[in-house]
Each structure stands twice: as C-alpha cells, then as structure tokens.
Image (cartoon, rainbow, N blue to C red):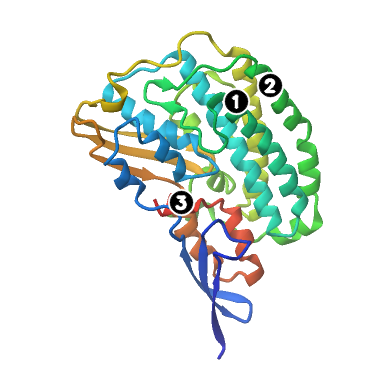
Amino acid sequence: MKEFEYFIGPQHLGMAGNFGIMVKVDGDIIIDARANPGYLHRAFEKQMERRYFLSNISLVCRVCVFDPDPNEAGYCMAVEEIAGLEIPEKAKWIRTMMLEFSRISSHLMYLGMFTSSLGLYTVMQWAVTERDYILDLFEMITGGRVYHIFIQPGGVRRDLPEGFLGKAKGVIAGLKSRLNDYYNLIFDNNIFIHRTKGVGVMDPKWALSMGVTGPNLRACGHRIDVRKDDPYLVYPELDFEVPVLHNGDMYDRALLRMKEIEQSIRILEQIFDRMPDGTVWEPVPNPLNWEVPAGDAFSRLESARGELGYYMVSNGTNKPYRVYVRGPSITHGILVLEKMLKGQRLADISPVLFSLDVCAPSIDR
C-alpha cells in the first residue's frame, strides 16, 4: 500500500475544538483532505426562528465562542433595520468598544493556539493571561466572561459601571507595553520563520475567487475591511488603518493579526477619551413579545475572522421568520483548508488550520 488514510482529530490537541480532518497521504505528503467540523452546535438558524427576537441574543453569541460580540451586533443590526429603530449615540460607542475588545481577545487566542501548534507554548501562556484581563472587563460590564448577552435590539443592556473606563485604560496600556515581547518571541524566532514562511500560501486572485475575507484576505494584499468599506456604528469617526501584507503565507497571516491588535488598541484609546454621556437603550414595545414589522434586512460587519453577515426576514410576528448567518469560517475551514492542505506535510496540518483561524461552531451552525 502506497497511500494511507488518517483521521486527524477531534481528540488531537492540534485541532480547533471538535474539528477533524480525514487526510490521504503518500509518505508524509498530503494528497487529499476532507474537513469534518463536527457537531458541537446544531441548527442555530432554525432555532432562531422558534424564539422571540430578544431571546435569540443568548443564542447568537455561541456561533463563534472566541468572538461572540460581532454575532450579537450583526443580529441586532438586522432587527433594527427591519424595525426602523435608531439606537442612542452612546450605545454606538459602547458597541464599537465591545467589538474591538472582542477582536483583541480573539487574536490573542489565535496567536497562542497557532504558535502552540509549532511547539512555542510560551506565547499561549502570555496570550491567555492577556485575554483574561479583557475577560475581566467583559465581566465587569456584562456579568459574563465568554458569552455576554449584552448587545440587544435598541442599544445595549446597561450603561458602563463606575470606574470601568479607568480600569480599561490600564488593561490596554499594559497590553500595549508588552507587544514588543510578542514580536520578538514570535516573528524573530528562527523556528517560527522556518515553519511558516512560504507555507500555506494563498494567491490573491485565488483568495478572492474562493470568498476569503478578513485578515486572511488582507494578508495576501487586499485592503478590504467592512469597517472602512461600508462603515457602521462609530467607525467613520475613528482614526485607524487597515494593515495589509502581501506574501499570503502563514507567517503573514499571524503578523497581520499582531498589527490588527495594535490598530484595535488605537481605536479603543480614542473611544475611552471620547465616550459620550446619555442613554444606552431605545425602549422597544414589550421586549419579550415584540412583534417586529414585516420586512427583510441584511447586516454585515467585520468580525475578527472576516466579514460576518446576518440576513433576516420578519413576517410581522414576535419571532423571526427566517435567519441566515454568513460567517467566514465555512469558507476558510472547508473550501480553503481542503485545497490548501494538498501538497503539505503531515506536520503542517495543525499550523495550516490554526493559521486560517477557523471557528468550528460557525460552520456547523
């Protein structure tokens, strides 16, 4: 027998959650790969059609565990567009802040998991610690560390607690002061360079044809970011850049996320200094039995993994008639991953998967 089949994961420590990959190899060279995202969560979209509009806030955040807030925001933006609901100005600033905290938290986990798949475990220890400080802030605002159920139609659930902005400034200043340590340990590391440069390369034209979005697309030269191209919330009022790299390999995908952390810090510093006063929620009629007018809407925003969209249809009742979630992971974790693994070595399976930042529940939604 010249060719063998192996099932990598989900028990394998180098897989994302319950993700699994069936590979066919010749020696240690992969000649075919089939992804299996597993069954961690099922039928989110159909469940949303059986719950009240407000009740779904506790469900949508589970579509992507490490980056839950964009799902809350995307869902609410669709509901608000159908209902013709304008949220208060301060709620827009708080939502933007939550999204950027979530982006940093997600990128830190990305760096930790990606480098751990190459044996660089120190970064994971650092990243988990930094992320825990951000989770402390989430807990201070919302009462929850991972799932927040905080953004809701009409604004946000409550105002910022006393002393929050001061604590948040300290957390972000601490992270900012340690970024050089991450750069030195990861991107000047000869082992990391050898294992990632020129590996898992994504051609710019191919990436566009496959529907790649977010940091994976920007790492191969495309300056595409919903926050700039179709601005929402208070992003038009903020000064930040969209980092772009051009090699499209695993090294650039990791480096780009480090640069995005820097830009998120820049955004948050502006929000801390410019946070307005005022109300944070526009009341809706009977939130637990709210009959949203008939209509449809599509909302989109930039999550940590790329463009996230919610298409929603209301038939005038107290539950959504149809909901469809367009997340980036179904493209990156199935279409791109299966093609990218062909020709790679067995040892590169986990790094390639983590370099694409796949969120398994978002695939099997």
Residue 7 rendering spot, x and y as whole percentages: 53, 73
Q: CA distance from mark 2 to mark 1?
A: 10 Å
Q: Residues within 10 Å of mark 2 (few under 14, many from 20)?
A: some
Front-lying residue, 31 or 278: 278
Front-lying residue, 184 or 208: 184
Instruction: Answer with mark 2 or mark 3, whichever residue precedes in sequence.
Output: 2
x 65%, y 25%: residue: 266
Residue, disc 3: 361
Instruction: Answer with mark 2 or mark 1, whichever residue precedes in sequence.
Output: 1
Q: CA distance from mark 2 to mark 3?
A: 32 Å
Residue 49 rendering spot, x and y as whole percentages: 27, 41
Q: Amino acid at mark 1?
A: Met
Instruction: Name the image quarter holding the N terminus.
Output: bottom right
Residue 57 in sight here: yes
Residue, disc 1: 140
Q: Amino acid at mark 3?
A: Pro
Residue 197 in sight here: no
Q: Are marks 2 and 1 in contact (CB under 8 Å)?
A: yes
x 80%, y 47%: residue: 185
Instruction: Answer with mark 1 or mark 3, whichever residue precedes in sequence.
Output: 1
Q: Residues within 10 Å of mark 1 (few under 14, many from 20)?
A: some
Q: CA distance from mark 1 to mark 3?
A: 26 Å
Label 3 secondary element: helix
x 65%, y 61%: residue: 199
Residue, disc 2: 167
Label 1 secondary element: helix
